[in-house]
Amino acid sequence: MASPRPESPETETRFDAVVCVGPHKVHMAKLAIKSLQYYARPRRIYLLASSKFFPELQLLAHDGCPVILLDEDKFIEGVDLPGLERYFIQRTGRPFGTGWYLQQFLKMGAARIPDVAEHYLIWDSDTIMLQSVEFFDAKGRVQVSPKDEHHHPYFELTEQLLGFGRAVPFSFISEHFMVKTRYMLELLQAIESRAPAGKNWVYTILDQITVENLKNSGFSEFETYGNFVQTRYPESYFCRPLKSSRNGATLFGMRPSKPDIYYLMKQGYCFISFERWNRKKGWKVLPSKIRSASVYAVERVLGKFSRRNRNALEVVAALCD
């Protein structure tokens, strides 16, 4: 069930958030950002997107979200989507995957935003937060949500470029990551120290990826940063699992309704992602839609008698209206 949003002023000001919004995720991003603001209350939410989506994303400010819009094609000097597409065509014969690589570099480059907080939360734009989550433990360590993935090319790159491979028996790849700004700056400086004269850090990374890996998945910002931190500051973070799912789009498609969100809250998820690659459409999501609508209808009546249900219904209304 949904937890109430935190009221602590410390929680409101201790970190910023960074969200990259791709061309197919604007609608979902608005819901994701509203949920992030409701439950996590970052000091500021930096949205990195194409400027053509700014008018729509700016509407989030009217909902009380402290958004700051940054043009993804002007964010890192010498790096933009058309330039990456030309690079990929030259090396692989196709521009496929350039947006996926770009958003990773944007998340890393966010450490150089003027006046960015001591920590910034990277949050996926297709992920909806469904209850409050603690990002720091009692000792002030960042809490990491470990996963099972192990993609060897990621570590071929870090070994070649930075001198370390996979330093932990789990994956740092998740739908979110709380970054310590100073550590990310150190990582960027380490990459730049290995860059040929006149080449920026983005293309220094890309040049080290084999053509075959570049065509697929040759780099992970989370694995690179997480294993970098493990090699230098292993006591700075703490692992704790969270109940989450990447199957939101499989259940409800890419346009979840109020009943859908309410149903997922009832399942106890901390957050859930709606990924286009595994989405279902039309009649294929109808059974899940009927189930969520039935639960929602019944509990709207019961909500009159249950404070717990009433609170959850209020959260859904705040997120989806």
Image (tube, grey):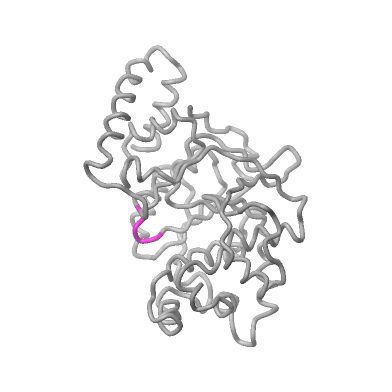
Query: Which residue occupies the extreme left position in the image?
Result: 283
Q: Is residue 214 magenta?
A: no
Q: Relative to 273, say whether 80 is above or below.
A: below
Q: Nearer the viewer, residue 159 or 52?
A: 159
Residue found at x 22% / y 41%: 283
Residue found at x 52% / y 64%: 104
**How many labels sit on residues?**
0
Q: Relative to 200, say whether 72 is above or below.
A: above
Residue 39 percent location from the top left of the image: 52, 37
Residue 262 percent location from the top left of the image: 39, 30
Instruction: Answer with left or right where residue 224 lies relative to residue 272.
Output: right
Q: Is residue 24 magenta?
A: yes
Q: Relative to 1, say whether 157 is above or below.
A: below
Q: Nearer the viewer, residue 186 or 70?
A: 186
Residue found at x 65% / y 69%: 158
- The part of the chain drawn in magenta is 22-26
Residue found at x 39% / y 44%: 31
Instruction: Answer with left or right where residue 318 lies relative to residue 156.
Output: left
Query: Which residue occupies the extreme top position in the image?
Result: 305
The secondary structure that dominates the magenta segment is: loop
Quadrant in which residue 258 is drawn: top left
Residue 212 percent location from the top left of the image: 49, 75
Q: Nearer the viewer, residue 42 or 194?
A: 194
Q: Relative to 310, say whether 305 is above or below.
A: above
